[in-house]
Image (cartoon, grey):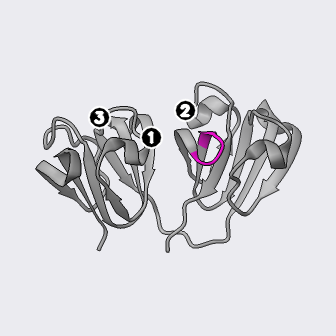
Amino acid sequence: MVKITFYEDRNFQGRSYECNSDNPDISSYLSRCNSIKVENGNWILYEHPNYRGHQYFLRKGEYPNFQQWMGFNDSVRSCHLTPQHRGPFLLRIYENEDFRGHTMEFTEDCPYVYDQFCFHDIHSCHVLNGDWIFYEEPNYRGHQYYLRPGKYRRYTDWVATTPRVGSFRRVQYY
């Protein structure tokens, strides 16, 4: 059974809230979130209610403080359980908006986009199979963006403020 537990204080202290499905607003249960235990499943956490704001991808494990999940603050207000997908994975990225310019396909994680793609920015992409996480910085750091299968004509379609993508990885279940 999938389960995530949110704690108001660091090191799994203070009030807690257990969740086993999507929740658009957890603010009635907790005023802040400083630590999390993921018992099972892959989760996307959002800084604001209704799946808005900064996004954080968490796998099974313990996160004793918000810096452990690359959080910018102690605000987690909604969560989404990602679907189970084991593969195959396929992502097509493009140099320009509307699927124009240099393109490249990926089936594996990419820790440094520039090494593979020779561009620092991705202006559009097509997720053909699987779910993916884009990271603003190389080596899976910085702002995160969760992408489901579909066409993203411009970077604002995945709710990014810039086209900068430093790395990306598949959302896999182990």
Q: Toward which corner of the image does residue 124 lie, by quadrant?
A: top right
Measure the alpha-carbon separation of dots 1 and 3: 11 Å
Dot placed on the residue nearer the N-terminal end, 2 or 3: 3
Residue at the image position 66 percent from the left and 32 percent from the top: 155
* 69 relative to 169, above or below: above
User: On the rendered structure, is 29 left or right of 153?
Assistant: left
Q: Amino acid at mark 2?
A: Val
Query: Disc 3 marks which residue?
Result: 75
The reply to whether callout 2 and callout 1 are in contact (CB within 8 Å) is yes
Judge the density around disc 2: few (<14), some (14-19), many (≥20) Cα neighbours within 10 Å. Answer: some
Query: Disc 2 marks which residue?
Result: 159
Dot placed on the residue nearer the N-terminal end, 1 or 3: 1
Look at the image and give the residue range highlighted in magenta.
Answer: 135-140
Q: Amino acid at mark 3?
A: Ser
Query: Disc 1 marks which residue?
Result: 55
Closer to the camera, 7 or 40? Answer: 7
* 153 relative to 45, above or below: above
Residue at the image position 68 percent from the left and 59 percent from the top: 109
Dot placed on the residue nearer the N-terminal end, 2 or 1: 1
